[in-house]
Image (cartoon, coloured by chain):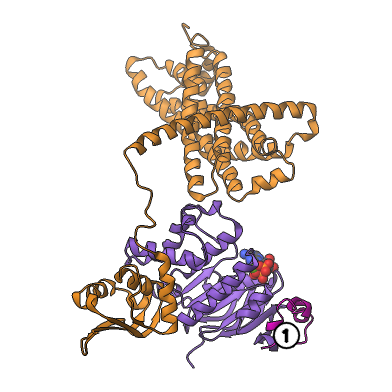
Chain colours: A orange, B purple
Amino acid sequence: MSAPTVSFDREGAAPVASLCGDWTLQGLEGRVDALRAALDTGEARAAARWDLTGIARIDSLGACLLWRIWGDRLPPTLDAGEHTLAMLESASVLGTRSRLATPQSTSFDSLAQLGRAGLSFGRQIGDLVALIGQLLLDLLHIARWPRDAPLREISANLYKTGVSALPITALVGFLIGVVLSYLSALQLKTFGADVFIINILGIGIVRELGPVLVAVLVAGRSGSAMTAQLGVMRVTEEIDALATMGVPRSLRLVLPKVLALVTALPLLVLWTSSAALFGGMVAASIQLDMSYGFFLDTLPRVVPIANLYIGLAKGVAFGLVIALVACHFGLSVKPNTESLSSNTTKSVVSAITCVILVDALFAIATRHIGLPGG
Amino acid sequence: MSAPVIDIRGLVTRFGTNVVHQDIDLSVEAGEVVALVGGSGSGKTTLLRQVIGLLRPDAGQIRVFGQPLFSGDALADRRLRQRFGVLFQQGALFSALNVLENIAFPLRELRWLDRATIRDLVMMKLAMVELEPRHAWLMPSELSGGMIKRVALARALSLEPELLLLDEPTAGLDPDRSAAFVSLIRTLRGQLGLTVVLVTHDIDTLAALATRVAVLGERRILAYGPLDHVMNVDHPFIQNFFASDRLQRRPDVTVR
Ligand SMILES: Nc1ncnc2c1ncn2[C@@H]1O[C@H](COP(=O)(O)OP(=O)(O)OP(=O)(O)O)[C@@H](O)[C@H]1O
Ligand SMILES: [Mg+2]
């Protein structure tokens, strides 16, 4: 490989510019600026004839450089080999500069952006409502044709979202119970109000902390998985393939996920709350010398059973919210990887936000139920 | 004669118990266009992936440009890889980037070209594969099957490779575009002395371009040589593949 060079020959009446060497991507590496400078002199502009016969190899980069240096045209007198000439002519598609300007942004754009965001939010809500409607229709369909019930999918989803979440939810619940009990015990001890640890843990965990904890864990675990799965199926056109086989996507893909999560979440709430109470009980027995028997005996007396029902109801509602949000974002993935990743993030964030919102609604709606003095 | 561009010796490939290649030897000289043909599932794509270095052979040696593919020196390996362009069977465009960015991507990775030049180069490549400037802003999911092939080809060409590996470049193209592809490869070969390995089922393309044909079947190379030589090899698959009626459409290319 030989380096690309430029030389000028002013003998005779007309000055001649001769180019030699390899005008290729490899040959030009690190020399582009120097060559541009050498060709941007008065001497070069005055050249009456261009001699390119010394060029050994030329590729698109060489051709495009020369084309631009010549001011977007070929010089009138040009000596070049057949291949060089063909390559240079292929650069003529470039035409003059700025033919391919990016769309300019104006100050008006930010307003349009805002409007677009609003419209897209409205559309998302619309899609979500349509999804819910479709699910109701699917349920009716199944009520009429029980044989179409996607039992296998439901059971597979139950296993994935419920059974396999048991260890992690138990661990997290247990640790939270220990921490909560330990911190409360420190405070209560100073007031000599040790027994109230059971009230605090009981109401706090069963009614509030258990459901929210499970919902956050499941949104991160199963919500993201659902979105990613549906999203990849969109990217690879698998959903279209299903549709052409006459398999309704909501019945086969969305409904099982929703039903499984609605079933699994309350059970997980029960499980995690138990683990958290157990953790609290262990910590209380260490910190406050409170016997297990006393703890278990007092718990049902100070925590009205309504709290458990509220916790389970929250579980059902949270499961519904997480599954709907996850499926909605999964189905709205555009066929590219960027949209897949952003929708997975959005799915988890929105699911957790919605869960907290719903939780607040629950708090307001049930403020007279199951609380001492309520 | 300088060292062959691709040199495969005693290649063995297995997927579990499925032996795909058994003792394959193949060498491609500089400036050649080698067509790799063979039945579906005969291991053509697999062979190409091994030459690129995406898949390690279970036994045997592959040298590209006289160098082993896995030298252990990351920089040398990367340099080596920049010398070949690859067109994947499914296109393998980056789905999050538009056409312009897809073709510009390898050029940007060089890190010494300015934006305007990269733009110009992309426009030239688009014109080479007969796409229009307005297509530059489309996303891969908005392209037709044939357009995906052409964008992938443009991307494979963007680094001005010395070796071009093409997996079914003309599948999904209409006859006019196939012919344009053939003339594009011919031109590039003339200008840059490209070496090309292409997998194809399209006899017209093969007849028009290939200097040598390698037939893959029964886990080995059944025949390797110029087209008229290969066509006369007495093997059922080869006789069937080059059945004379398929060539009748192009009577000018039967014997060269
Ligand atoms: N990653 C893999 N794991 C297991 N087996 C594989 C893998 N890739 C390929 N194979 C097997 O290797 C064989 C050859 O596959 P390959 O993709 O190379 O075929 P091909 O010749 O390119 O076929 P086609 O013309 O249909 O593209 C097939 O039997 C295939 O099942
Ligand atoms: Mg293949």
Image quarter where the N terminus of chain A lies is bottom left
* Viewer-proximal residue among A8 and A165: A8
Is B248 situated above or below A335? Answer: below
Point 48% across, 7% down: residue:
A374
Please check the rendered image and state whether residue B240 is part of the magenta-colored stretch, yes or no.
yes
Identity, as a three-letter code, of the amino acid under mark 1: Met
In the image, the segment drawn in magenta is B232-256
Circle 1 residues within 10 Å: few <14, some 14–19, many ≥20: many
Expressed as whole percent of the image width and height from the top left, the position of residue A98 reads 35, 57
Label 1, secondary structure: give it.
helix
Is A40 situated above or below A115? Answer: below
Please check the rendered image and state whether residue B246 is part of the magenta-colored stretch, yes or no.
yes
Is B140 situated above or below A203? Answer: below
* Viewer-proximal residue among A147 and A28: A28
Which quarter of the figure has residue B226?
bottom right
Q: Is residue A271 left or right of residue B72?
A: right
Q: Is residue A266 left or right of residue A171?
A: right
Q: Spot the residue most to the bottom.
A: B1
For mark 1, name the chain: B
Expressed as whole percent of the image width and height from the top left, the position of residue A11 reads 21, 90
Expressed as whole percent of the image width and height from the top left, the position of residue A368 reads 50, 8
Q: Is residue B51 visible?
A: no
Residue denoted by label 1 = B231
